[in-house]
Image (cartoon, rainbow, N blue to C red):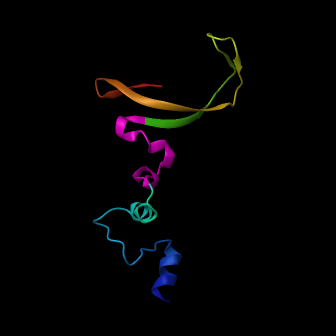
Amino acid sequence: MSSLKAARADNFYHPPDWDPRRGSRAELAAARLGEPAWKAHPLRERAKKLGEGILVVRFEMPFDVRCSGCGNRIAKGVRFNAEKKCVGKYLSTKVLSC
């Protein structure tokens, strides 16, 4: 079996110009295309604000709720994007704010 066939069988293929000391293969591909560095991150768009300590998470409403501000109903199963920010610590546990 040739080396390319063996690499594809294991789902590992390393291009010849890739050096593991310079960064990941995704970073190399992003640099070739001139894309921003966050596009090489496994979280993609959710990692845009990771340098500021903000992680974007996607969640789904577990039950029906009514907004106390405007009175609108939000149904069970509606999906939202939320930003998780670390606002402090309690002992060794992070305190997060959405």
Going 40% across and 62% down the picture, which residue do you hit?
A: 31
User: Residue 13: x and y, percent?
Assistant: 46, 74
- Tell me, yes or no, whether the highlighted magenta stretch contains residue 39: yes
Q: From which residue to which does the magenta span run?
A: 36-54
Position of residue 36 relative to residue 15, above or below, is above
Name the one closer to the observer, 73 or 12.
73
Going 41% across and 29% down the picture, which residue do you hit?
A: 85
Going 46% across and 63% down the picture, which residue do you hit?
A: 33
Name the one closer to the observer, 42 or 61.
42
User: Residue 64: x and y, percent?
Assistant: 70, 21
- Tell me, yes or no, whether the highlighted magenta stretch contains residue 8: no
Position of residue 17 relative to residue 91, above or below, is below
User: Residue 68: x and y, percent?
Assistant: 62, 10
Q: Quadrant of residue 25?
A: bottom left
Position of residue 93 relative to residue 72, above or below, is below
Q: Horizontally, is 87 left or right of 1 in the view? A: left
Name the one closer to the observer, 91 or 41.
41
Q: Quadrant of residue 80?
A: top right
Q: Quadrant of residue 55?
A: top left
Tally the numbered discs. 0
Name the one closer to the observer, 12 or 85.
85
Going 36% across and 35% down the picture, which residue do you hit?
A: 52
